Amino acid sequence: MSCTTILVGKNASYDGSTIIARDDDSGSGRYDPKRFIAVAPADQPRHYRSVLSHVEIDLPDDPCRYTIAPNVLNNRGILAEAGANEHNVAMSATETIAVNERVLGADPMVELKPAHGEPGDVDHRDERPGGIGEEDIITLVLPYVTTAREGVIRLGELLETYGTYESNGVIISDVDEIWYVETIGGHHWIARRVPDDCYATIPNQLGIDDFDLADAFGERREYLCSADLREFMAAHHLDRTMDAAPGHFNPRKAFGTATPKDHIYNTPRAWYMQRHLNPSEDWDSPAARHTPESDDIPWCRVPEAKISLEDVDFLLSSHFEGTPYDPYGTLGTAESRHRYRPIGINRTGHMVAIQVRPYAPAVNRTVMWVSFGSGPFTAAAPFYANVNDTPAYLRDTTPEVSTGNLYWANRLIAALADAHFYETSNAIEEFAESARAYGHRLVERTDAELREMTAQTSASESQESAGAAEITENASIATIARLQQSNEEMAEYLRTHVTKLLDDVLYTSSNLMHNSFAMSDRWN
C-alpha cells in the first residue's frame, strides 16, 4: 500500500485557503515517472474505457479545462492522481485504504472477469468488466463539476452504478469546503466534510471515526453517503459502535481494519503528523494517550497553530525526525530506526498540495505546490492551475532516466544523497528553503501584476462599453498567458537550482566512495 494524505480546513490554514495534499507513492519496488500537464476540453474522452478494469462509460460533452499530475506510462491507465479544474475544484485520488472481511463479504469488489473459452463453446463466458478505480476517478469526475460537493455526488453515482475493484479514499475541495470520500466494499461509500478549523490525517487506512447518519439522510451539511447505507449496515450487522451519540457511528470500527501490519505501516504516520501539529500533547512518554501503534488516533483535530504550506511539505517528506524511529537518525537502536514505515519514502512519485485561495480572483485562485521524487531530498514549488499548458521541464518527463526533466533529476539526487545523508543535508536544505521562498515571492508578484491588469481592464471597459466583451475576453487570454509565464519562471528556477544541487550532491558523494584513495590517505 502507498500514499499519505493531510487535509487542512480554511480556518486551520495560515491564509484562509483550503489545502489538500497527498504523497503519491508507487507500490513496493516500483517507481512510476510523473509529469504535470494541462488537459484541454477537446482532449477529454467522450467515451471512456479503463485500461485495468475494461469498464466503459459515456461521458458528458461539456468538460472543462483541468490540470493534473499523472503517470508518464499509460500501462495502468491515466492515473491523474492530483488536479484542479478551471472552476477551482481540486481533487487528489487516491489514498489506498482497506475494509474488513465483513464488508467484503457483504459487498464484494467489482473485479474484471476475463472471457473464458471461444464463442460457441459450451463453457464460453463473455468478459465481465470491473468497476472504477484510482486509474479513472479524477478523469471521470473533475472535468464535470463546479463545486466540491458536486464532485462528491458525481463520484458517489459512479460508484453506485459501476462499482469499484479496490478500496480508496478520495479528496475533493473548493474554496469553501474539503470533502473526504471513502469507498465501502464494491458499491457503497461515505463522505465527511473536514471541519473548517481542523486538519485531517490519512495514512493508508480507513480513517473517518465519526459519522452522523441523521445529517447524511437529512440536511447533508457535513456528511454524505450511498442511498442504502443504513439498510446495508443493518442487513449485515456492520455497526460495532458502543458509545457514539444518537444517530452516529464509527466507520473505522464498522468498516476498517486494525491489524499488526497497520501498526507498522499506517498508524505511526498519523501519530507523527499529529505530534507535529499538536506538540503540547504528550506523545512520547509511557503515559501518552496515543502511541505510534494506537488504533484510535483521531481522524481530524484542531491544530495548535495555523498550518502553513511549509508544515505540509515537511510532514509529507518526514521520516520521524526527532524520534527513535528516524531511519537517518541517531536516537534509539538499529531496530527502532527501521521499525515503522516513514512518510517521506524512497518510492514517492510526487507530492501535490493544492491551495485554493479565497482572497485571489477566480482566474488565479488555485495553486498546485508540486514536488517530484522522494520528499526528504526535494521541495514543493508553486504552479498556477488555470493554464492551457505547463512547463516542459515538468510536462515532458521521459520514461527513461534523463537529467533534462525535474522528475528524474530529483530521483538521481535522492539516490545519491541517501547514502551520505548528513554530508549532503546542508545543500539539500538550502535548496529547499530557497525554492519555497522564491515560490512565495513569485506568486505574490504574479498576483500583484494580475491585480494591476484587472484594474486596467476595468478602466478600459468603462471607457469603451461597446467593446467591453471583447476587452474582457482579451484580458482573460492575457491573464492565462501571465499565469503560464509565472509557471515557466518557476520551472526555470528549478532547472537551474536542481542542476546545481545535483552537481553538489554528486561531488560530495564521489568524494565519499568506498574505493577513493589519495597518497595522503596512506599516511593519515
Image (cartoon, rainbow, N blue to C red):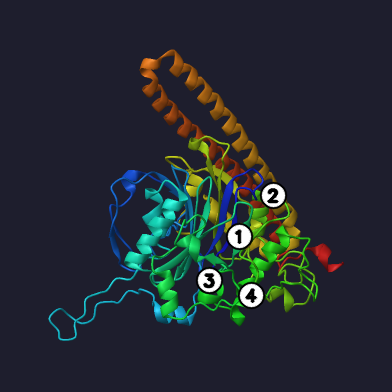
Residue identified by numbered label 2: 306
- Which quarter of the figure is the C terminus placed in? bottom right
Which of these two is toward me, 287 or 23? 287
Residue contact at pointers 2 and 3, CB within 8 angstroms: no
State the residue at coordinates (65%, 69%).
297
Callout 2: SS = loop
How crowded is the residue under tag 2: few (<14 C-alpha within 10 Å), some, or many (20+)? some
User: Which of disc 4 and disc 2 is earlier in sequence?
Assistant: 4
Real-space Cα distance between discs 1 and 2? 14 Å
User: Which of disc 3 and disc 2 is earlier in sequence?
Assistant: 3
In the picture shown, does residue 192 fall above or below 364?
Answer: below
Q: Position of residue 271 (x, y in %)?
A: 68, 68
Which amino acid lies under the numbered mark 4 shown in the image of this protein?
Asp
Real-space Cα distance between discs 3 and 1? 15 Å
Q: Residue furthest left?
A: 120
In the picture shown, does residue 489 fall above or below 78?
Answer: above
Real-space Cα distance between discs 2 and 4? 26 Å
How crowded is the residue under tag 1: few (<14 C-alpha within 10 Å), some, or many (20+)? many
